[in-house]
């Protein structure tokens, strides 16, 4: 049964049992000192603001049995899936594949590629390893969402204007309703964070809606109060 979620440019009704929480790239390489983000000269502490709001929505989603999907940006150790033009940028010491304090930068299996401990996936929560900025590019995310009957994505993570925005644009073109959670997104550039969110909700919601963690939790709670608790894997009328 649909519930109301407060959002901009206008509130909407969502079916929480057909919604997924998508957490984009909350990886040590972007959030912790010594990773890719820091190597590029960014102040990684700015991204920490998103951790607590995401953690709160994640708890609510897990509690109600909502689908939770985590993504990680990164490449195979031989970089066979990394376009040379993506790798060959900037100082060779800070490029993808270069050694760093948390292992090789943005390489799968290295400590820096992993998700931060505060938001670590539970067994059974899908992790999408993506070679690009968008979570749909060269991944099985669309198939996974469609197979589970998902129509709405609550999207958070980092960075607002790069991987979050790219993923929302890809999702919108594939027919998903996207709601970015403003305090669950963050950027190394506060102006880009604001602009990234503004672009999503502009023109009547050209790419989607913008809400926040508390409003998402309220919607999830309203759903939980009405619906009997559904363990992950079961939706009305079938299995997801
Ligand atoms: C970036 C991302 N910023 N996850 N990746 O390179 O936004």
Image (cartoon, rainbow, N blue to C red):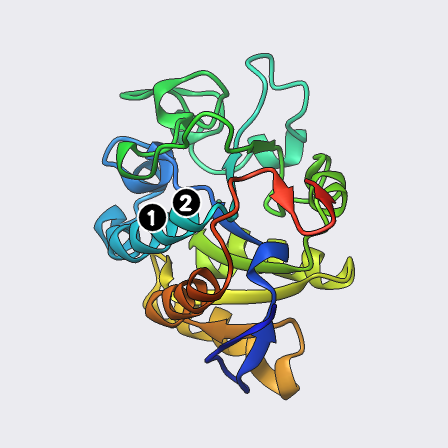
The answer to which image quadrant residue 46 occupies is bottom left
Nearer-the-camera pick, 188 or 221: 221
Q: CA distance from mark 1 to mark 2?
A: 5 Å
Q: Residue at x 41, y 30 (%)?
A: 122
**Circle 2 residues within 10 Å: few <14, some 14–19, many ≥20:** some
Give the residue number, with chain letter if any, for mark 1. 59
Q: Position of residue 207 (x, y in %)?
A: 65, 71
Q: 72 and 219: which one is in front?
A: 219
Name the residue nearer the viewer: 190 or 18.
18
**Crowdedness near tag 1: few (<14), some (14–19) or many (≥20) residues, C-alpha within 10 Å:** few
How far from the left and from the top, in percent, is residue 235? 65, 48
Q: Are circles 1 and 2 on residues that touch, CB within 8 Å?
A: yes
User: Is residue 150 found left or right of 96 in the rendered image?
Assistant: right
Q: Image quarter for residue 143?
A: top right
Horizontally, residue 209 falls left or right of residue 221, namely right
Q: What residue would you read off at disc 2? A: 62
The residue shown at (53%, 37%) is 89
Q: Residue 237, percent across and down?
A: 74, 49
């Amino acid at each position: 049964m649909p519930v109301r979620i407060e959002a901009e440019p206008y509130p909407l009704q969502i079916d929480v049992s057909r919604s997924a929480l998508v957490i984009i790239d909350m990886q040590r390489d972007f959030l912790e000192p010594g990773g890719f983000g820091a190597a590029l000269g960014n102040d990684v502490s700015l991204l920490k603001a998103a951790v607590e709001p995401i953690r709160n929505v994640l708890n609510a989603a897990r509690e109600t049995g909502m689908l939770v999907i985590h993504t990680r940006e990164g490449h195979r150790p031989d970089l066979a899936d990394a376009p040379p033009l993506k790798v060959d940028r900037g100082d060779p010491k800070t490029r993808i594949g270069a050694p760093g304090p948390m292992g090789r930068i943005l390489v799968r299996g290295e400590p820096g590629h992993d998700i931060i401990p505060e938001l670590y996936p539970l067994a059974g929560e899908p992790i999408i390893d993506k070679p690009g900025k968008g979570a749909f590019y060269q991944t099985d995310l669309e198939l996974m969402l469609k197979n589970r009957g998902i129509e709405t994505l609550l999207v958070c993570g980092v960075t607002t204007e790069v991987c979050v925005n790219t993923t929302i644009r890809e999702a919108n073109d594939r027919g998903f309703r996207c709601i970015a959670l403003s305090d669950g997104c963050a950027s190394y550039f506060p102006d880009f964070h604001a602009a990234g969110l503004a672009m999503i909700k502009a023109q009547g919601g050209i790419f989607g809606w913008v809400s926040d963690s508390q409003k998402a939790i309220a919607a999830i709670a309203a759903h939980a109060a009405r619906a009997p608790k559904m363990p992950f894997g079961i939706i009305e009328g079938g299995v997801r």
